[in-house]
Image: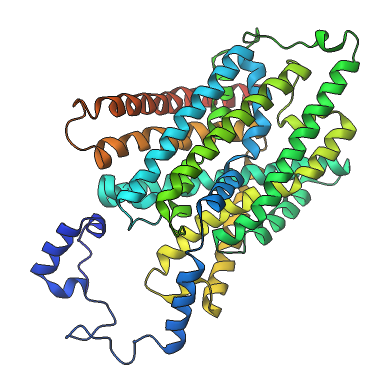
Amino acid sequence: MVDKSIDRRTRYQPQALALAEEKDPKVFQSPNSLEDGSLSPRNSPTEFEQDREIQGKRKFNRLGWKRLTICLIVEAIALGSLSLPAAFSTLGMVAGVFSSIVIGLIATYAGYIVGAVKIKYPEIQNYPDIGTLLLGETGFWIITCAFVIGIMLGVGSHCLTGIIAFVRITESDVCTVIFGLISTIILLLAAIPPSFADLAILGYIDFASIMIAIGITMTATGIKSSQSPGGLSSSTWSAWPREDADFPKVMVALNNIVFAYSFAPTLPSFMAEMHTPRDYVKSVYAIGLIEIVLYTLIGSLVFYFVGQDVQSPALLSAGPLMSRIAFGVALPVIFISGSINTSVVARYIHGHVYRDSVVRYVNTKNGWITWIMLVTVLTFLSWIVAEAIPVFSDMLSITAALLNSGLCFYVPAVMWFVLLKEGNWFSLKNIRSAFYNGVVFLLGIGILVCGMYANILNLVNADEL
């Protein structure tokens, strides 16, 4: 019988594992083993199971850095980009551009740190495993809860955007619950492929979809502004924050920018499928550069064209006809990006529950049944979240402040101090990295404290109206 008191972190500390095994070799014996350590005939893997395992390992080891970049684009460049013009409207052009670039650089560095932990500890398969390295069993469950809830809130945001899209495209009086169910079913179907390498193929469609939708929005808003009385010079854009920009509104705007750069939590899950994990650095730099350039251009140009009346998501500002077209073009990105988040959580839960079984490879009857059931449950939970928080910007802001502040910023900073740093932090070789990670940590804590305070004030004010 395995001693459950053994800390989870021994999985990642070979010396501790060896000492524990020396004290009691049976502790680490497979539950299917005989006293001599051999597999019992009853529980030994069949030829079919061995074949399924070999095929499964091949299937989940096909991701290169280019496809990893596509996976990160699918996961990150979607809903966040649609909220940026409204964030710029609150912050003003100067603070908006500055925040977009600075937060982007910090998020890229934090993603690099998360990947470096995966390289140093190759046994970890996902972000919650890093929690084990930091705080043992307690850290595992804290990070697991934040990881699952944070990503599922993101899926809920996609479901909510799907509802907004269908309402705008159809211009019908159909109850939004019906559109919510339709969005949920599409998200479910798109999340069924279990391999990220397979989902990356859909990623090319996803990226083309969001780029075309953004292009339509920027072109339509630009033409609409130029044709208005006074032309582009009549736009109400401002270099400085708007007059009614109080603390809660400013924090919601900053939180939406943070949400747009939140790719770090999914990185270890994607890297677990890479055939050359060290190439992750290329993908992190690529996604960071693409995001910073794209987000800054989207936020500044649409805000410049539309002015302070820009809506969130930004596609709503393109005018009645063009917004319908833009939403139609954006449907693939709404559902593909949402589905890959569902897949990340489902892969984590499924792999954890069936970690000692061939079922985890999702290439057997039981594997497919359990996988589809799990994806179905997670997707419908996201629909419930979308119905419970029906305001797009508020949902993104709550997710960013409560969960992404840690998963994307202050936790990666702690990772460097605890898991990557060699020697004293104030030594000559560490002082620069210590400073960088100190900045990342402070930003994350600031987003958590100030962001949640602002969200609470917003919810209280909304109840009073």
Indicate the position of residue 177 as horizontal and vertical percent values.
75, 48
Q: How is the image coloured?
A: rainbow
Tell me if I can see residue 251 in this picture: no
Indicate the position of residue 113 as horizontal and vertical percent values.
37, 39
The image quadrant that residue 194 belongs to is bottom right
Outermost left residue: 23
Indicate the position of residue 95 as horizontal and vertical percent values.
57, 14
Residue at (42% x, 48% y) in the render: 145
In the image, residue 324 sits, relative to residue 228, either above or below, namely: below
- Picture quarter with the N terminus: bottom left
Residue at (81% x, 46% y) in the render: 175
Number of marks in picture: 0
Residue 59 falls left or right of residue 168: left
In the image, residue 151 sits, relative to residue 454, either above or below, namely: below
- Picture quarter with the C terminus: top right
The one of 308 and 387 positioned closer to us in this rendering: 308
In the image, residue 79 sits, relative to residue 377, either above or below, namely: above
Residue 7 falls left or right of residue 83: left
Outermost bottom residue: 41
Tell me if I can see residue 51 in this picture: yes
Residue 55 falls left or right of residue 123: right
The image quadrant that residue 215 belongs to is top right
The one of 376 and 278 positioned closer to us in this rendering: 278
Indicate the position of residue 311 as horizontal and vertical percent values.
74, 25
The one of 250 and 260 positioned closer to us in this rendering: 260
Residue at (53% x, 75% y) in the render: 363
Residue at (71% x, 41% y) in the render: 210
